[in-house]
Amino acid sequence: MRIPPMKTIVSAAALLAASFLAVPALAANLVLYTSQPNEDAQATVDGFMAANPDINVDWVRDGTPKIMAKLQAEIQAGNPVADVLLIADMVTLERLKEDGKLLAYKSPEAGQYDATLYDADGYYYSTKLITTGIMYNTSAGMKPASWKDLTKPEAKGLVTMPSPLASGAALIHAQTLTAVPGLGWDFYKSLAENGAIAAGGNGAVLKSVASGEKAYGMVVDYLPIREKAKGAPVEFVFPREGVSAVTEPVGILASTKNADAAKKFVDYVLSEKGQEGFLKLGYIPARNGMKLPEGFPSRDTIKVLPIKAADALKNTDQDLKTFSGLYGSN
């Protein structure tokens, strides 16, 4: 048997080693549960994967109540699938925090955010500000500037709003406004007495006001601002008392097996690059020092009213009962 020269053996070994080095490491797989619209979710994931090519992300999208129902069923079955959540509001993540279902992570990006926009222990962080204000049809006889304008005789029977029973943003909105001195539940009672209706979600409000069926509506900011840009006969107002906001916080499930990749996702959506992605999609970035989307006023003219997630969580059942007593169970 002929023995190959040592040089050949070494060369073969070097080539073999080089071939192993040329094979990329197996990518981490991350699962995101989100309530973002499909296009927004895909854009967020695409941006993250471009910045982190060694991490693959699968995502599941639905409304926050349905996403939470899915997650809770998985938790009860002992097999939660999600690694990361990016869903509507801080109250929902506060509930998961209190239940011990979230992983605390102190992101280095947190220093660029107001302390009211993230959990002090690092369990969740706001990613954007989606405010609720007043939209009106341009043919309306009154141009509202205050929440109380919707209770005036000129608005009788002409006001619509999403129901907190169907919309997480509407629940946060009601809990925020009812904590404002001079508004409170008396404001919602006055609205009901003035013929305001509450049913469905924000999309139904947009359609109703844009079509002229109703003259005024409470609605999340980006919907009428986008529609106005397309030529719809609507305007959006940030009332003088201030606006509520849902902040689409991000949090990591305590059950994750991909904690390092999940932390990178949190850092990305909080980073300037990640926030620019939300800006391009038409949202107000939660990070300080960022521009606002086209069609929005300057940030310093928008007064965002505070809400304490822990208090809102504690009061949710009673608040829904109170609202239903005024407007029914729509």
Image: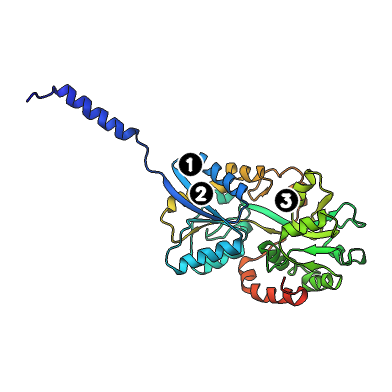
How far separated are the C-alphas under marks 1 and 2?
9 Å
Q: Earlier in the sequence, mark 1 or mark 2?
A: 1
Image x and y of residue 9, in percent? 17, 26
The answer to whether residue 304 of the structure is visible from this angle is no
Contact between labelled residues 3 and 2, with CB atoms less than 8 Å apart: no
Indicate the quadrant containing the C terminus: top left, top right, bottom left or bottom right.
bottom right
On the image, numbered disc 1 is attached to which residue? 52
Q: Nearer the viewer, residue 309 or 95?
A: 95
Image x and y of residue 77, in percent? 44, 68
Q: Earlier in the sequence, mark 2 or mark 3?
A: 3
Q: Secondary structure at mark 3?
A: helix
Image x and y of residue 174, in percent? 73, 67
On the image, numbered disc 3 is attached to which residue? 222
Identify the amino acid type marked 2.
Answer: Phe
Q: Residue at coordinates 92% horizontally, 63% vertically from top-left?
A: 154
On the image, numbered disc 2 is attached to which residue? 265
